[in-house]
Amino acid sequence: MTHRPVPQRPQPRSLILITALITLGVLAGAEEKDPTTSLLSLFQNLDDAPLAEVRRLVYAGAEVDAVTTSGYRLVNEAAATGRADVVELLANAGADVNASHPATGLVPLLLAAFGGHAETVRVLLDAGADVSITANNDVSVLDAAAVGGDTAVVALLLNAGADVNAAAANGVTPLFVAASEGHPQIARQLLDAGADVNAVGDMDQTPLHVAVMQRDVAMARLLLENGARDDLISEFGATARQEAKLQGGQLWDVFQRTNRT
């Protein structure tokens, strides 16, 4: 016995059209979360977030100054991660490039400098980031850059007018930070830009005291060659020269070659 095929019921034209649109992906995101929620979710793994997807969500109306679960705004997160492309997109869309964290006072420029992200720093400066803004305890952008250790970042900030002798609440300047972090190239940049080699900071210490405490021969030599005084007494009751003599070795040799008594 031969079976005749069962005739298919014709589909309404509207159903055919909807099916085609779904197949093409036009309606695939019809039930998508609101753009801001989706953008915040994307920022949870910003390192791998496609720029095209960030752009799509921004164009869809996502709030560019939305705050993440860490309390930072999107542009701060992008700056800390070194996503210069995302920072530029957000800035062009109206994000506040000087937005600070309510607890730390950290702004995008400081976060990018801390991370040593030179291209991100450049993008932020071009977008109007303020080099004079400080975080809590008056930590400056050059303090952050001295920690980050990227000479290109330091150069960008100096060229933008950052204060090379800006002092934090405890009196520490960027040169102190460079000495503490062991970055002689950055210390040289700061000195060439006019950093006070004999600035007195916390506990009446100078950058030279810090270099000696770190047993950093190269840093001590650099500071001495640039006029650092080795006779200033800290609150610990000793000069940098006295401390170096106690430590001996190559560090003391550097001080002896200065022919000071």
Image (cartoon, rainbow, N blue to C red):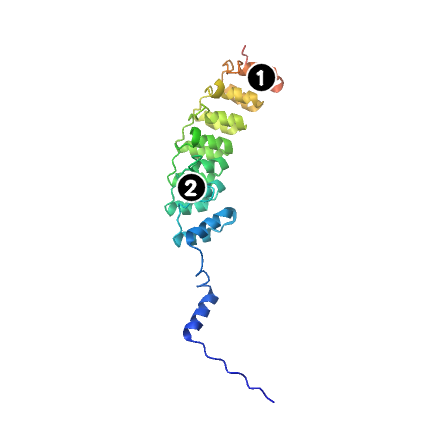
Task: Determine the residue positioned at 47% across, 38% down.
Answer: 118
Q: Secondary structure at mark 1?
A: helix
State the mark number for residue 219. none
Q: Which residue is mark 2?
A: 123
For the residue pair 80 and 33, the one nearer the viewer reads as 33
Q: Position of residue 217 (x, y in %)?
A: 58, 22
Name above or below for residue 122 compared with residue 173.
below
Instruction: Specify few, some or many for label 1: CA neighbours under 10 Å numbering under 14, 14-19, or 20 or more.
Output: many
Task: Determine the residue positioned at 42% across, 41% down.
Answer: 123
Instruction: Specify few, some or many for label 2: CA neighbours under 10 Å numbering under 14, 14-19, or 20 or more.
Output: some
- In this orientation, does residue 44 appear? yes
The amino acid sitting under disc 2 is: Val
Most extreme residue toward the top is 261
The amino acid sitting under disc 1 is: Ala
Q: Position of residue 105 (x, y in %)?
A: 42, 34
Q: Using the numbered discs, state the Cα–Cα distance from disc 2 to disc 1 in whole angstroms.
A: 43 Å
Is residue 193 toward the left or the right of residue 249 in the image? left
For the residue pair 244 and 76, the one nearer the viewer reads as 76
The N terminus, quarter of image: bottom right
Name above or below for residue 147 compared with residue 84.
above
The answer to which image quadrant residue 258 occupies is top right
For the residue pair 54 and 126, the one nearer the viewer reads as 54
The answer to which image quadrant residue 91 occupies is top left
Q: Which residue is mark 1?
A: 244
Q: Secondary structure at mark 2?
A: helix
